[in-house]
Amino acid sequence: MATQVVMPKLSPTMEEGQISRWLKQEGDKVSMGEPIAEIDTDKATMEMQALGSGVLRKILIKEGESVPLGQLIAVIGEADEDISSIVAQAGSGTNAQAAQPPAPAEQDGKAEEQAGQQQPQPAADAAKASAPSGNGSQAAPAEAQRGDRLVVSPLAARMAAEAGINLRSLKGSGPGGRIIKRDIEAAMSGGQQTAEAGAQQAPQRHLRAVQPGSQPAQAPALEGASPYRDEPTSVMRQTIARRLVTSIGPVPHFFLTVEIEMDRVAEMRRSVNELDPELKISINDVIIKVAAAALIQHPQVNASFQDRNVRYYERADIGVAVAIEDGLITPVVRSADQKPLSQIAGEVRELAERARSRKLMPEEYTGATFSISNLGMLGIDEFTAVINPPEAAILAVGAVTPKPVVRDGQMTVRQMMRVTMSCDHRVIDGATGARFLQTFKRILENPLLMIV
C-alpha cells in the first residue's frame, strides 16, 4: 500500500515548511527511517525521514516551495503500484495551486500578488521565489517579455540585491532553471556586477557641464515614486513577525537601565585567556554566567506568565540571541548557573556555529527561562529588546567603552557598559527588576563573587 508523505511538524513553532533539497529522486528506493529530504523550518534545516519502504514514486512539491503542515508532498509505493488516484486527489485538493500556470512577467509581479490573495493555501506566497517585482520603472528584457517567469531562491535574491546583480542576466543552475546561491557567487566572481550593469538597472540622469557664459542646466524633475522590488520572506522571518506581534502588544513591557563598571571583568577575562588560550572566554560568556547566578538569587525574574498562574523555574536556562542569515535564533545554555565559564564558552561557540548553519535541534533553541541579546560587538551603546514569550524578561547588552567617571571625588576613566532589561509587568514589578539588576551589577563589578 502506498505511503503518503506529508509535511511533518519538525519544531514546536513550525506552521509550514520549505523543501530545501530532495535527498532522493523519483524512482529511487527508500527504506523506513532513511532521510529523503531536507526541510527548512522556522528555525533550522532538518532532515525528513521516510515513514515507509519502497520506491519514491512521485514528488509533488519541488525544491524551494513551501507548504503548510500536513500537506501531501510525495508518494512512496511499490514500483508497479497504481498511485494515480492519490496524485489526482493531491492535484485537485491541497496542491491545486501548484498546477496553476505562473503569471506572466510582463505584469511585473502584480498578477502573482493577486493570485496569492485569491488562493486559499499559505504556500501560494512562497511556492516559488519569483524575481523581485518592480513598479514598472525599468524595462524587462526580451525573455521576460515573452512570458518566461524568473524563479530565484530567497537567499539568491538577497545576495543579488546586495551585490547589485541583475537577476535577468543570469541563467539558473537549480531545478527548473531556478537561480540559486552558487549562481550569484559565480556572477560575483566573474565580475558580472559591473558598474555598467548597475547603470542599466537605474534611470539615466546625465548632467551637462556648464560652459563659461552659459546658463546652468536645470536638474531633471523627479520621475515619480522610487523603483522598488518585492522579495519573498523566509519561513523564519514570517515566524519572527508573528511572534513579535504576540509579544510587544499583549505583553506589558517596561524597561530598566543600569551602567556597570567592567574593568575587573575585563582584567579577569584577559588573565584567564592568557593562562589557557584555548578557552577563549568572551565578555558575553561572563555576562551569561552572572545573569544565571542573579536569576537563582531572584527567582521572581526567572519565571513566566501562564494565564492563571506564574511559573517559577528551578534552573537558569539562558537563551543567547544569535543573528543568522534569515533573522534571529536563541540557542539555550542549560543550567548556566551550575556550569564553569570554560564550559559556557565552549557551548556558546558550538551552538552559535550550528545555529548559523541551521543545524540546531528544537530542544536546543526552545525552553529558555531568560534571554540575553548583545549588540555591543556591533558598536551599539544601548538598546531595548523585545521579550520572547513566555519568558518574563530579556537583557539587552551594549558595548563596553571607556568613559570619564568620578571615583572618590576624582575624575578617572573606566570601562563602562549599559544594559537594559525588558520586563513583563504581569510577572516582574519595578522594584523586583531593580533588585535583580543590582545583584547583576554587583557580581560583574566584583567577579570574584562568582566563586564564593
Image (cartoon, rainbow, N blue to C red):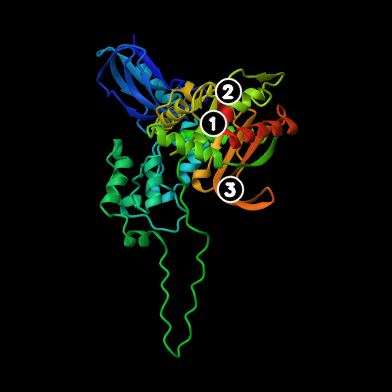
For residue 3, say whether it is visible: yes
Q: Which labelled disc corresponds to residue 239?
A: none
How many residues crowd mark 2 within 10 Å: few (<14), some (14–19), many (20+)? many
For residue 327, say whether it is visible: no
Where is residue 347 shown, x and y percent of the image?
44, 27
Disc 1 target residue? 288
Mark 3, secondary structure of its residue: strand
Q: Quadrant of residue 193?
A: bottom left
User: In the image, what residue type sits under mark 1?
Assistant: Ile
**Cα–Cα gap, marks 3 and 1:** 22 Å
Of residues 404 and 254, the one nearer the viewer is: 404
User: In the image, what residue type sits under mark 2?
Assistant: Ala
**2 or 3: tag closer to the N-terminus:** 2
**Cα–Cα gap, marks 2 and 1:** 10 Å
**3 or 1: tag closer to the N-terminus:** 1
Mark in front: 3 vs 1: 3
Of residues 363 and 445, the one nearer the viewer is: 445
Disc 3 target residue? 414
Mark 2, secondary structure of its residue: loop
- In the image, is residue 380 above or below residue 199? above
- In the image, is residue 214 above or below residue 26? below
- In the image, is residue 275 above or below residue 214? above
User: In the image, what residue type sits under mark 3?
Assistant: Arg
Where is residue 70 shown, x and y percent of the image?
46, 20
Give the left or right position of residue 326, taking residue 312 as reference: left
Where is residue 266 shown, x and y percent of the image?
51, 40
**2 or 1: tag closer to the N-terminus:** 1
Give the left or right position of residue 77, taking residue 290 as reference: left
Disc 2 target residue? 316
Residue located at (48% from left, 21% from top): 363
